Image (cartoon, rainbow, N blue to C red):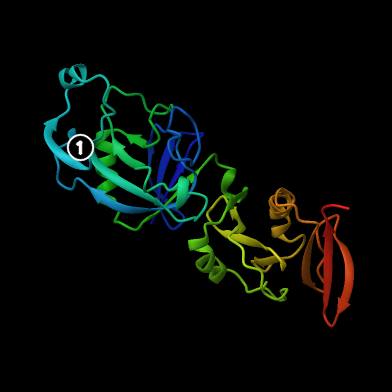
Amino acid sequence: MHIEIDLAAQTLCLHDQNQLIRQYMVSTAAAGIGEQQGSMKTPRGLHTARAMIGHDLPSGSVLRGRRATGEIHTAELGAQHPERDWILSRIIWLSGRQPGFNRLGQVDTLRRYIYIHGTPDDQPMGVPGSHGCVRMRNADVIDLFERIRPGIDVLILEDASARLRHYTAEVPVSAMAALQARLAAPQLALPASPVASDDHLAWALWQGDGQLLALAHLQAGSGLHIWQQPQEGQPAWFALWPQAERAALARGWREVRLLLPADQSAPAGFEEIRTLPEAVLWRYWLAA
């Protein structure tokens, strides 16, 4: 099973393989779409249900700090505390699975406390209105809760066409090795730099469905290193080159070097400087 949330349609769909099991109306962030800490926005991308809280609580049970208070929400209770963002009945606590995009650092869905949860029944569904979470009717969130288990995949899409859209994100140093392991090792690479550097300059290219397509790592004294999924046509990692170029310029570099197999080309602006057995060394001038 897996869950898909369409932010444009304001729907949550539960699928079993390719079969739609349930569809519910939801309400996501009034502030829109985004991953940044403190943004009050609903994050995109692939997530997992890290924790499920509230099993067997009565419908309308009030939760604060992920603990039941013993209260049942009523219109009178709501009127007494109009400032509260009510979390009712059940919590499905989400955790991002895309480091640098919705996990770790300032874009960590788990640490932002993004939930799927129940809300007072007088709150509208089908229109954005939350503080970042995914609100549901109490009966709906209880029904969903009973059908799933912790660890289920939750994919949050901007709209129905976003599944194949591409997104770039900086890669935290703590996630670099794990992401490299998901991709094919560089067929060729420049030697590791002997130059010590505190800079960590790496970017990931993600597909809207959460698939990792490519990594680019810019290393002082060495050059540009690439990992990517095998593919035909223009390499996906070309989309990461603008970030790498800007970072190199900001640090006052004069050039960037790149070693590629002989049958692969480099982005526009690179020039061949040496032909090696089965490889070509490329250079991009950043300054005269």
Q: Position of residue 7 (x, y in %)?
A: 48, 36
Q: Residue at x 27, y 47 (%)?
A: 145
137 vs 33, left or right, is left
220 vs 147, left or right, is right
166 vs 109, left or right, is right
Q: Is residue 280 above or below residue 241?
A: below
The answer to which image quadrant residue 61 occupies is: top left
Residue 103 in sight from this viewpoint: no
Q: Residue at x 17, y 36 (%)?
A: 59
Residue closest to the eye, 105 or 49: 105
Q: Is residue 204 above or below residue 126?
A: below
Q: Is residue 254 above or below residue 124?
A: below
Q: Residue at x 75, y 50 (%)?
A: 249
Q: Position of residue 78 (x, y in %)?
A: 21, 21
The kind of residue tagged 1 is Leu
Give the farthest residue toward the left. 70
Residue closest to the eye, 246 or 187: 246
The answer to which image quadrant residue 241 occupies is: bottom right
Residue closest to the eye, 79 or 178: 178
Q: Secondary structure at mark 1?
A: strand
Image quadrant containing the N terminus: bottom left
Crowd rating for badge 1 (residues with CA inside 10 Å; few <14, some 14–19, many 20+): many
Q: Position of residue 49 (x, y in %)?
A: 34, 52
For label 1, the residue is 63
Residue closest to the eye, 146 or 35: 35
Q: Residue at x 41, y 44 (%)?
A: 13
Residue 118 in sight from this viewpoint: yes
Number of on-image labels: 1
